[in-house]
Amino acid sequence: MTLPKGAYNATQEEPEILKYWLDNQFFKPEYHPEKGLLSTEEMKNDGRETFSIVNPPPNAYMRPHIGNVSGYAYQDVFLRYNRLIGKKVLGQPGKDHAGIQGEVVLEKIFWENKKKSKHDMGREKFYKTSYSHFEKLMPKIMYDEQRIGLSSDYDRNLFTLDPRVVERVLGTFVQMYKDKMVYKGVRIVNWDPVAKTTLADIDTERVERETDLVYIKYPYAEDPSKFVTVATTRAETMLGDTAVVVDPKDKRYKDIVGKKLKLPLTEREIPVITSPRIEQEFGTGALKLTPSHAYEDFVIMSEWNSEAEPEQQVGYINVIDKDAKLTGPIPEKYKGLETDEARKVVIHDLQEQGLIEKIEKHTQNVVIGERSKAIIEPIMSSQWFIDVEQLKKPAIEVVKKGEVKIHPEYMSKKYLHWMENLHDWPVSRSLWWGYRIPVWYKGELIETIDTEGQVKESINGIEIDGIYDAVEKGLAKVQIDAPGQEITILRHGQTDANEKGIISGWDDTNLNEAGIKYANQAVTALGDFDVVITSTLSRAKETAQIIAKDAEIIETDLLKERNFGLLNGLTWDEFSEKYPEHVKNNTAEYQPELPEAETIEEVEERVDQLIAMIKEQYSDKKVLLVTHTGIIRIFKRKLADMSAAQSRQDDPENLEIHKMIIPESGWIQDNDVFDTWFSSGQWTYATIGANDLMDTFYPTNIMETAYDILELWVSRMIMLSLYTQNKIPFTDVYLHGLVKAPDGQKMSKSKGNVIAPEEIIDQFGADSLRLLYVVGNKAGAGYPVSYEKLEGYKRFLNKIWNASKFVLNFTSDYEETDIAADLSKLEDISTNELDQKILTEIKEVTDKVQEHIEKYRIGLGAELLYQHMWHTFCDEYIEQVKPRVYSRDQEGNPINTSPEEAASRKEAQRTLIIALKSYLILLHPFVPFITERLWKEVPKSETDTETIMYTHWPKTK
RNA sequence: GGAUGGUUAGCUCAGCUGGCUAGAGCAUUCGCUUGACGUGCGAAAGGUCACAAGUUCGAGUCUUGUACCAUCCACCA
């Protein structure tokens, strides 16, 4: 017994235990309790049942707050419990690029640090700088996950913009295109006429301003003496009106519904239609419908059209262009006027015709650009949509049939309601940070408004009608890679030098055994090529010869590497200084023969020549290049832009195989990126797939996340997994509530009431924090942070600690190993009545806790354990058992020495040990740190493992 | 306006398929305690489970309605 005296010190013990787990790779599914660490292949084939959870990826732009990490506590309960019942378990962690929020945060950072906007930086630079910024933050966020005890396999951690993930996400879009599920449709966007860009809602803000509410008379077409009066703050948009809308229940307008009105100042006639969205009380109860320049109007139009007969449908007419000037099918005198000016002119003209009934003052919220402060013009723009009809039906079915179960159950009502009302999904976003849409145009895609006020797209002056038309005309391609020729580049075979991170391009010796093996592996991994281009150096040449088989081999000096510092961007002198060992041992004798080192620019030029050569001579061939690391770097720099798919790296045998595209000139990629949920929705199979574990761990078991993204995220994962994999992504959804601030308020950065996990962990320990998340809380319900409760849980940990100390103190002379946590035959443990009583209760508790966890009532399971261990085991049993286990009385004389007493003492000791071990195991999913720490001290049976993580759940049958 | 929850002790919340003489933590009051633990132990006090009606042998638990609160979504022409 080596437990230190005094109280349990969580903050000191926990980091050491975490290190112990990580060092021993216990979090990997490859860890096997008897055989140790298996290879991935062996793990896939071993017989253990599987269990997997994909951790919802936290935003990678900031450290999580105490609420953000709460989910990991629940996920970890499931992970650890399933390990204890003998399954092989995968927790799949990841980090999210966070689309819009990410871009906003990055823009802010770059602006503060460098006074540069993203436009100053340019798209490519912005993307790359952002990427490295995120990469730097990710390990810190990962540590936050580990510190709370989340036992996921961090070696398999993935970033959402990891090329392997990107490839899968974009591939889904390409597949949808082939299945005719994507289309371009018009949609209202926030257009900032000053910044000349589309803004996401989050990039806008609202300001109050006083404006005129103008009441305009629209005469009846049949009888100009009668009219309908509409109220508007944007009089000039009347030129784009396509209907007047009233409440269907409004008696005032009963007679005019379905008839036509004459639209003043124009020659057009517009119908009167109805919508339940209209409020009779506002204005005159009649709304002028301008679907092209008001979001609500657009929605009303869509709803009306989805119900109405074809001849009754209403359209939209765009009358404002991207300079906020009037355009479209309107009288000449208004064309080109800016909106503010146009409003005055329009009101003036209407007044002259006697069509203004009155003008009232009205306070209105206008939307302005957050940065430019310009008034946002809602305009029509062509956006990408996904037809959800085919997606939603199976996703509704699986929940209705219970193939995917949602906990708490009532949340499935929310899910079904959302799904049944789901409309086509607009997936494009005008951002730079994210997955750029894999559509390529032969020239710039121009959006214009034609004389009818309709949005039109053209490429190179040729009008296109949607993506399928554009592809047919040869003006667009939908594919992951840029149009061009794919080439494969393989690093030539050598193994000795690169361990130091150094290339050995000048090393002109022949292939060694490892090199030959490497080349042979490459043969199988790569397949056949038409042409293999290699440098004249013998190693590369030899590798190429083995791989080439029947292919034509081209040797060229262009591929030779003559800049030794390329890898690290060093000059020869810097290189020699940095790697003296390498220069001395490996290259000294060859150095005199080497041509002078080149500058990087010179090498780049040779790479350019090489690319030109391939284009010219082998453009229709399958080309493989065998070359050196430094040259590969140059290729990457030249060919891999932000379309991550182009720098894909595929390493089946730890070979360095790079697939790159030599782009065909003239193709321009679509400017937009995907809605974050389009990629997040694929996170389950994108991650498991990128780690090549689909056969073993898919579908996953539990998706544990916050209830507020059930509709946004969970629904998309279900739809997209069914579509791409033909499988559900998970069988169960567990939704936890949101952690609120101590005062019951929602925690948010803007309120300044966020609490960092460290703040709590330093004070109370991660185990206490986990108990706060779990004990007595039910799925879906929020709860405030309570320092009183944290204090209580800290005391509970201390209780566990001290009870263990008692057991260990008075059982140190118990030497037998019949002390497995096996409650199946209690009479084998003890015949004593008290012992039987506590053991029976522990047995019942074991079954109950198990049932609670398996039925997703983990709050009840934790609470039961807390109560029972403390108030039954500690307060009652230990007090009662004391006289039986003491070996000396108050004066120090030996007691409990008679044969009966000794036997009873032994039974008591065995009971104490088995009871304690059972509690530790049951508690482990909830408080992993302290239970692991105590497990180290506890006497073991033959079946016990060194770590508590992989020991056996107490046997009760 | 739509959807979904909540309303149980002074506070924060549990209560799974109806059996409850309604629980926990914290707070309150009284007492005890020196060989696991004062981060302890024992006990007390505290609730017509929002309100109303219904189903049932039996309702905190099921049904309907009302009131208030919360969250999400949609919007303010």
Image: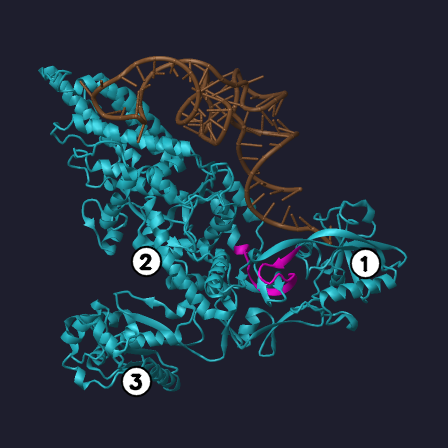
Chain colours: A cyan, B brown
Mark 3 and 1 residues: CB-CB less than 8 Å, in contact? no
What x and y, as percent, mark residue A862? 36, 32
Residue that mark 1 sits on: A260
Asked which quadrant contains residue A902, the reply is top left
Q: Mark 2 lies on which chain?
A: A
* Above or below, comparing residue A611 to residue A657 in the picture: below
Say whether disc 1 or disc 2 marks the residue closer to the N-terminus.
Answer: 1
SS assignment at label 3:
helix
* Above or below, comparing residue A641 to residue A79 in the picture: below
Provide the residue span drawn in magenta. A366-390
* Residue A558 on the magenta segment: no
Label 1 Cα crowd, 10 Å radius (few <14 / some 14-19 / many 20+): many
Residue at x 83%, y 50% (from the top left corner): A255
What x and y, as percent, mark residue A155? 30, 55
Residue that mark 2 sits on: A692
| C-alpha span from label 1 to label 2 | 63 Å
Judge by depth and name the residue closer to the eye, A320 or A533.
A320
User: Same subunit under labels 2 and 3?
Assistant: yes
Residue type, label 2: Asp
Q: In the current view of this chain or complex, which residue is farthest to the right?
A: A225
